[in-house]
Amino acid sequence: MHANPIAPAAAEDVEAAVQRIVRSTPARRMDLIPILQAIQAEYRYLPEAALRCVARELNIPPATVYGVATFYSQFALNPKGKWVIQVCNGTACHVRGAKRLLDALNRRLGLTENGSTTGDGLFTLEIVSCLGACGLAPVVVVGDKVHGQLTEEAIELLIDHLEAEEGQGEKVEEAGREVRSR
Amino acid sequence: MIRCLQDLLERAEEARAHRQAHRAEVLVCAGTGCVANGSMEVFAALREVLAKFGLDSRQVGVTGNGACLCGGGRSVVVKHIGCHGFCEMGPLVRIDPEGLLYCKVKPADAEEIVEQTVAEGRVVERLLYRHPVTGERYARQDEIPFYAKQTRLTLKDCGHIDPHRIDDYLAEGGYRGLARALLELTPDEVISEVTASGLRGRGGGGFPTGRKWQLTRQSPAERKFVVCNGDEGDPGAFMDRSVMEGDPHRVIEGMAIAGYAIGASEGYIYVRAEYPLAVKRLREAIDDAEEYGLLGDNILGSGFSFRLYLKEGAGAFVCGEESALLASIEGKRGMPMPKPPYPAQEGLWRLPTLINNVETYASVPVILAGGAEAYRRYGTESSPGTKTFALTGDVANTGLIEVPMGMPLREILFDIGGGIRSGKRFKAVQIGGPSGGCLTEEHLDLPLDFDSLSEAGAMIGSGGLVVMDENTCMVEVARFFMSFTQNESCGKCVLCREGTYRMLEILERIVEGKGELRDLDLLEELAETVKDGSLCGLGKTAPNPVLTTLRYFRDEYIAHVVEKRCPAGACRALVRYRINPELCRGCGLCARSCPVQAITGRRREPYVIDQDRCIRCGACINACRLEAIEEVAQ
């Protein structure tokens, strides 16, 4: 069994990492958002210790940092899963059945709430508004890969594939096959 | 390094000669849509096959004068290009100079493309576009009806040039508009030219661009900024993404011209976080332009200096509003500010700031290079030029298009879009995203321009056109948009924050069959109040989808509240599923797919659905191979 991927980061490591990130920028007030983005890229969320450290480094109140971190939907205050699955619910995807994909994913992963993560820390399911790939509706993004014109069967296959890759779940015959809808 | 006009012209000539020296160019679309469909694998396969033909893959696709292919004496290149707009048919591969377009290409097709088309000049019939209705096949890209009716000015190079290569843009006359502005015109003359072109803001509002530039120029300040709004958040719109990904230098050139005109030497491009590819391409393009001396100090020896910075958004729809966007650049929560003062007077760090949308800036080089008069030849008197639209939804050909302003909706939907998919009936088109409205059959001959649309209660917005067929419930569409705006309301104005929430509650009640007639009046009253009591465009336009659907589809609302019936059969609470005993052969697939075990039956006999258990998820409908499961009104 591999280490729990969502174990919170130790505070002193966070401190050192944040200082390194802040010092790679000019550390102006306007750099706050890029700094938070860099921290999230490293930890897949914004640990509380990191927010406090950023406030100190930029010399602004922690409340201001928290305000920005909670305003933008990109930022998460809780650890995200290894695979973030974003179901696009833009107009075009909505009209072409995004809701059905979402229901299928929720059923499969046993999740109910938007933005929640599976117990094993593997998958986080998010609903996002338009990803700008409307020509391929309905669209789901896993990690940084865009999957278009998806069906419920294709999305199941995709999850099989990822689980097989993680050495979890039953090996499924189709798992190795490239998941792409017709 | 390009130091003067002479350098620019020479470099462009060199780049042009270089492109023409190729025997053939194999252009693989690398837009988000085609990449998702596997165009990178196609690209790799094409390079591999060409290498097998004796071409060094290093020479192929990087620089010209590579080894020859089958005695032609000239080289073949494989290139990435930006979005063609025909995303549905991707991955797309274009072969120049013939102008052939191959659709839905797979890596396995690479060999045939090289052997047949590149080497022998023969067309691979099966890869050509086939019209879904007439069945006719088209070889040349410009003959396909989807393209034939378009007029591409801002998208001219999208899908023809390699967005990674500044030389490709120069070969097509790039940066000539900037050269003309800097070397032949005064800043005031540049503004006059833009004013004379009649260009209006392409981000939605339609404010005259020249007037905005004039106002920013007149604001006295030592330091000013040019900002590009690339926070294309409207669901169903992706025009700006395609331009930023496919032709980034055009945006940069437009911004540099604007900087010269208003007297700014710094600019920011704000791109939403959901567009990683656009961010990457713009970053590269800015670096290349700096290296060439087309950004930086003393551009083309004119004495004008201009630098550009890229800012990534972090996921907030309201940041598409200009004052919120500026707050976000400053590193703050993206909340709108009351106006006036307008950004032209007090913008970024309270200094005069010109803020335009991606497509607006991308239109500027066309105007400066070709002149205002040539630009006015397209479009209508009050809305000159062309407009890009993202055509999506239940239409046969989805994709990105550019047409002259004023083209009737009918031509766009049926000639370019190829009509409604799977032969269903047209019901409505949603235009302008969550700020826009729905147009119906009676509007099909309406010319699409700023003024006719606002008369009809809609707006061009950023240009999303989502087509809906008879199976779409308009009340549900209104609910969808309201849930979007409610979620994205930043919470500053009480009426937007609470009002959209109440409107959403009412709409949710109606689609669940729990609405009452007086809800409709309450919706209208709330809509007017939210419009009046909100600071920014988000709140002011949030009620539009509700108001237009109430105006044009009132009978659907009434069916929901009075008869508790959804005429489109889309609202789940108002339909039930039924297995047609005449079609069911009792295979049991549906029962196995049902997540709540609501379906029972004996093998080879018709199955039945327990209505009390059924959660109407639709899994059984998808599972059934005989289409024996139907949705019927409650």
Image (cartoon, helix red, strand yellow):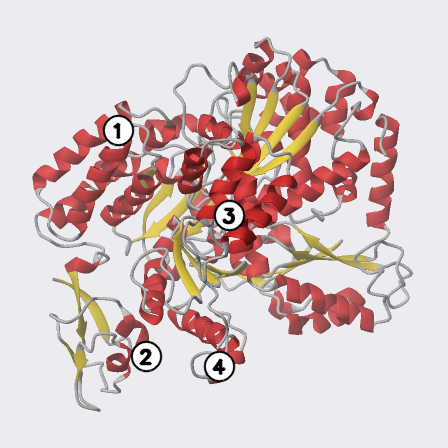
Q: Which residue is mark 2?
A: B625
Q: Which residue is mark 1?
A: B494
User: In percent of the image, x 81 and y 73: which residue is there?
Assistant: B52
Q: Are marks 4 and 2 in contact (CB under 8 Å)?
A: no
Chain letter for mark 4? A
Quadrant showing the C terminus of chain B: bottom left
**Residues at marks 4 and 2, CA–CA distance in whole angstroms:** 21 Å
User: In percent of the image, x 47 and y 27: which residue is there?
Assistant: B322
Label located before the other in sequence (1 or 3): 3
Q: Are marks 2 and 1 on the same chain?
A: yes
Q: Which residue is mark 3?
A: B274
**Residues at marks 4 and 1, CA–CA distance in whole angstroms:** 52 Å
> Relative to B575, is B278 on the left or the right?
right
The quadrant where residue A95 appears: bottom left
Label located before the other in sequence (2 or 1): 1
Q: Residue B196, position in %: x, y?
A: 59, 17
**Residues at marks 2 and 1, CA–CA distance in whole angstroms:** 51 Å
The outermost residue toward the front is A12
Q: Which residue is mark 4?
A: A174
Front residue of B422 and B253: B253
- The mark lying in front, picked from 2 and 1, is 1
Above or below for B351 versus B366: above
Label located before the other in sequence (2 or 3): 3
Does residue B42 appear in the picture of this structure? yes
- The mark lying in front, picked from 4 and 1, is 1
Q: Are marks 2 and 3 in contact (CB under 8 Å)?
A: no
Q: Residue B321, position in %: x, y?
A: 44, 30
Amino acid type at image mark 4 = Glu
